[in-house]
Image (cartoon, rainbow, N blue to C red):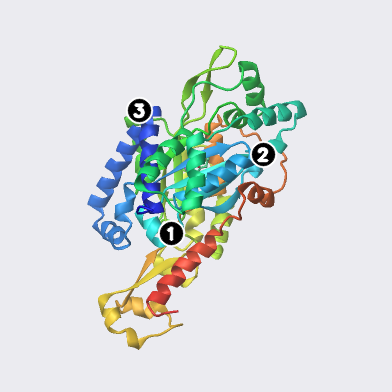
């Protein structure tokens, strides 16, 4: 067989193709990319230290290609095929998110690269949600939705054939890889022709807007793509100048010296023309834009503290009050790399400096890294958080479902049924971060 293409290269090509397609479909996304690029450039110019840190941690190159997308599917077989499709691109399911607790009838995972080199090259992630039909209370409607979904195939025959070929060959040639990207893209394209009549659409929509979004179309259109910014407050405040109306609140932790986890905001979904099968014309509102600022990944201890403080803070009506209040409450969360390390709240990647290399024989496994850092032998770099936050995700969902929080009693977390649909267990994000930290310590001779 001719030389096989690396999964990282297929992911890179796919992520670029998705971005190009979404720019055509949702022009405001293109504007958002420009705004984010402008702000990132200004931040790097004004903060040489941050510039240097990002460059040292190999984060600078990935910044401009970095984004995540989100999709929603309706049945188990669709989720299982997506898993195979993303695996070809070196993306694996990480974490389980139960959003039913926030009144959103889905549960989700994120497909993303997991090893250091792949993350460094292009950390493209896709937040993928599976509709939980069992949460539709109206039995007639539930059955109607299931029948509609049963009939559809969201993958092209070409894509399915290539997945089989990949399994047989163990890889793709360059030609096959390009064809795969082209075919795979079709699944995520927007279709203005619904698969149902207007009445069915409205019935499902009345049950929950999300159900109509998942059930009534022939594909699982990408509903947003999210670039990474270095200053989300700045982008949020500049959005109106660029003709974009942001969501009211920035989700996640407050602004800090050492950013943690993930802060996100989005702009409102567009109202798009749709033709229904009975030739009726109507509209559908689902696709939007989002930006995010990523910080350091937290350990289970750090995450528990984050969850507790976030719950304690609650939400205010406007962003200024909300952020101010968050900052007050988060005073209880140490805000220096040293304290985060010392208290075991966050993950770090260790590297020896040239002087450290020269003194390798002076320290060994189990030694405390802190004195070595102070001596300038060792550097500790925050490990970037690569995952998502369920409370933030619920806020993003809700702002694009028209803010009507449909709080209901929903079933318990149902991870087992999700994994069964997926055809695999999801990976544990904490184990992945811990493994990355451990690998780096071992390379330095500290483990
Ligand atoms: C996914 C919403 C969650 C995020 O960044 O937290 C999400 C969706 O609307 O389908 O993308
Ligand atoms: Ni998102």
Q: Quadrant of residue 47?
A: bottom left
Quickly name the residue at label 3.
243
Q: CA distance from mark 3 to mark 1?
A: 31 Å
Q: Upstream in the sequence, badge 3 or badge 2?
A: 2
Callout 2: 10 Å neighbours few (<14), some, many (20+)?
some
Q: Residue at x 54, y 47 (%)?
A: 83
Residues tagged 3 and 2 counted as in contact (Cβ below 8 A): no
Label 3 C-beta lies within 8 Å of the nearest ligand 2 atom:
no
User: In the image, residue 262 lies at what x, y percent?
Assistant: 46, 51
Secondary structure, mark 2, is: loop
User: In the image, residue 150 lies at what x, y percent?
Assistant: 66, 32
Label 2 C-beta lies within 8 Å of the nearest ligand 1 atom:
no
Q: Residue 177 vs residue 422: left or right?
A: left
Quickly name the residue at label 1.
296
Q: Upstream in the sequence, badge 3 or badge 1?
A: 3
- The image quadrant where one finds the C terminus is bottom left
Q: Quadrant of residue 31?
A: top left
Q: Is residue 221 or residue 357 the one in the foreground? A: 221
Whether residue 91 is visible, yes or no, is: no
Decide: is 328 above or below 431: above
Q: Upstream in the sequence, badge 1 or badge 2?
A: 2
Secondary structure, mark 1, is: loop
Q: Residue furthest top?
A: 279
Quickly name the residue at label 2.
132
Q: CA distance from mark 3 to mark 2?
A: 36 Å
Q: Residue at x 47, y 43 (%)?
A: 162
Residues tagged 1 and 2 counted as in contact (Cβ below 8 A): no
Circle on res. 345: none
User: In the image, residue 342 lies at what x, y percent?
Assistant: 46, 72
């Amino acid at each position: 067989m001719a030389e096989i293409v690396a999964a990282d290269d297929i992911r890179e090509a796919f992520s670029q193709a998705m971005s190009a397609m979404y720019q055509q479909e949702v022009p405001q996304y293109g504007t958002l990319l420009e705004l984010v690029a402008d702000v990132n450039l200004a931040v790097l110019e004004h903060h040489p230290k941050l510039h240097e840190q990002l460059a040292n941690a190999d984060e600078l190159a990935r910044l401009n290609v970095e984004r995540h997308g989100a999709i929603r599917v309706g049945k188990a077989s669709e989720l299982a095929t997506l898993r195979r499709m993303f695996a070809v691109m070196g993306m694996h399911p990480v974490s389980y998110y139960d959003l039913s607790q926030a009144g959103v009838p889905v549960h989700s995972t994120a497909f993303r690269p997991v090893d250091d080199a792949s993350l460094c090259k292009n950390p493209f992630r896709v937040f993928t949600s599976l509709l939980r039909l069992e949460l539709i209370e109206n039995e007639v409607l539930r059955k109607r939705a299931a029948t509609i979904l049963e009939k559809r195939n969201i993958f092209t025959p070409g894509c399915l054939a290539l997945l089989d070929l990949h399994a047989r060959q163990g890889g793709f040639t360059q030609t096959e890889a390009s064809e795969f990207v082209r075919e795979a893209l079709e699944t995520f394209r927007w279709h203005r022709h619904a698969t149902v009549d207007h009445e069915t659409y409205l019935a499902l929509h009345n049950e929950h807007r999300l159900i109509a979004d998942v059930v009534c179309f022939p594909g699982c259109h990408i509903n947003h793509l999210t670039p990474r910014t270095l200053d989300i407050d700045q982008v949020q405040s500049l959005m109106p100048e660029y003709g974009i109306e942001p969501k009211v609140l920035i989700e996640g932790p407050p602004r800090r010296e050492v950013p943690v986890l993930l802060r996100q905001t989005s702009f409102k979904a567009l109202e798009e023309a749709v033709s229904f099968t009975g030739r009726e014309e109507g509209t559908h509102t689902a696709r939007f834009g989002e930006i995010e600022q990523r910080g350091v990944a937290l350990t289970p201890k750090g995450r528990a503290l984050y969850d507790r403080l976030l719950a304690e803070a609650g939400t205010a009506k406007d962003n200024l009050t909300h952020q101010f209040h968050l900052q007050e409450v988060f005073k209880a969360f140490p805000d220096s790399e040293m304290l985060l390390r010392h208290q075991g709240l966050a993950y770090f990647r260790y590297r020896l400096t040239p002087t450290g290399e020269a003194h390798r024989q002076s320290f060994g496994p189990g030694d405390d890294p802190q004195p070595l850092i102070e001596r300038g032998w060792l550097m500790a770099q925050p490990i970037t958080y690569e995952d998502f936050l369920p409370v933030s995700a619920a806020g993003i969902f809700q702002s694009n479902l028209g803010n009507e929080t449909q709080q209901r009693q929903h079933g318990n977390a149902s991870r087992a049924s999700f994994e069964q649909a997926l055809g695999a267990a999801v990976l544990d994000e904490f184990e992945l971060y811990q493994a990355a930290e451990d690998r780096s310590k071992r390379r330095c001779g500290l483990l």
